């Protein structure tokens, strides 16, 4: 799981990236996720994600109430599985801090970070928490590029198109303009990243 918390033009922005396997475990096997909210700049307590009933189970295991919780409803699950970005305001999760949260699912953590960097959503100074190896470590540098297997063009057309549609909707709505701009840029960058990856490696 990838976690980012940073200041945006109109408030605090939290970006969470789930690998397809993380998403499958959360939805199909009802394995909730919880992590310190401080990792994404939301203060004390823990932020949890899970299906209906997971909040109570997490709080029982942790022995304390969660600071915030995002229920992975059918609508949220459908959004993520189809390659779209789910967005909501932090207040709806139980936090007083003004801002927005964006949740998306990608092939794996490396692909998610690559897309974030290509879109300019993160810089060399951005603290990215990567739990792909079961550890929480800052990722502040971009690894040297390595040849990757060709990617199918469907990864460029469907997810990026949906991301840009969501971003444009947010821009028109006006309530999360900075987040909308970021998502549109992500869609464009994801398309370029996929198309570039389809070129033969030197």
Image (cartoon, rainbow, N blue to C red):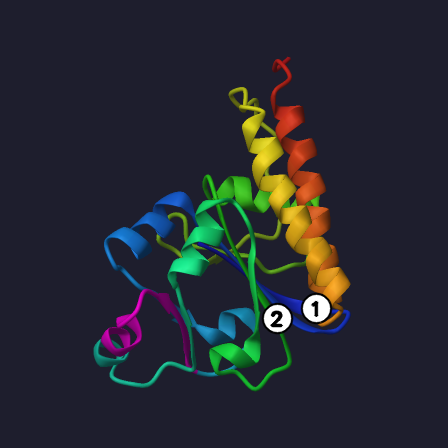
Q: Position of residue 98 (x, y in %)?
A: 64, 81
Q: Between 46 and 74, which is closer to the camera in this rendering? A: 74
Magenta stretch, residue numbers? 45-58
Q: Does 173 sit above or below residue 65?
A: above
Q: Nearer the viewer, mark 2 or mark 1?
A: 1
Q: Position of residue 148 (x, y in %)?
A: 54, 24
Q: Is residue 53 magenta?
A: yes
Contact check, label 2 and label 1, Cβ < 8 Å: yes
Q: Position of residue 187 (x, y in %)?
A: 67, 44
Mark 2 nearby-residue class (10 Å; few <14, some 14–19, many ≥20): many
Q: Quadrant of the N terminus?
A: bottom left
- Secondary structure beneath dot 2 equals strand
Say which residue label 2 marks: 100
Q: Between 188 and 61, which is closer to the camera in this rendering? A: 188
Mark 1 nearby-residue class (10 Å; few <14, some 14–19, many ≥20): many
Residue 176: which disc? 1
């Amino acid at each position: 799981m990838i976690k980012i918390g940073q200041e945006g033009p109109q408030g605090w922005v939290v970006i969470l990236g789930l690998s397809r396997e993380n998403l499958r475990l959360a939805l199909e096997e009802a394995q909730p996720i919880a992590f310190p909210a401080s990792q994404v700049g939301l203060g004390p307590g823990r932020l949890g994600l899970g299906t209906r009933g997971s909040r109570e189970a997490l709080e029982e295991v942790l022995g304390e109430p969660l600071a915030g919780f995002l229920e992975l409803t059918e609508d949220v699950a459908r959004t993520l599985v189809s390659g779209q970005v789910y967005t909501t305001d932090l207040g709806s999760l139980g936090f007083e801090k003004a801002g927005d949260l964006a949740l998306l699912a990608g092939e794996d953590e490396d692909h998610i970070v690559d897309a974030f960097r290509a879109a300019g959503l993160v810089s060399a100074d951005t603290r990215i928490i990567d739990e792909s190896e079961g550890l929480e470590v800052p990722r502040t540098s971009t690894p040297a590029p390595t040849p990757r297997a060709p990617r199918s063009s469907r990864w460029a057309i469907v997810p990026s198109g949906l991301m840009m549609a969501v971003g444009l909707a947010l821009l028109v709505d006006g309530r999360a303009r900075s987040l909308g701009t970021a998502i549109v840029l992500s869609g464009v960058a994801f398309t370029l990243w996929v198309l570039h990856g389809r070129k033969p490696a030197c």
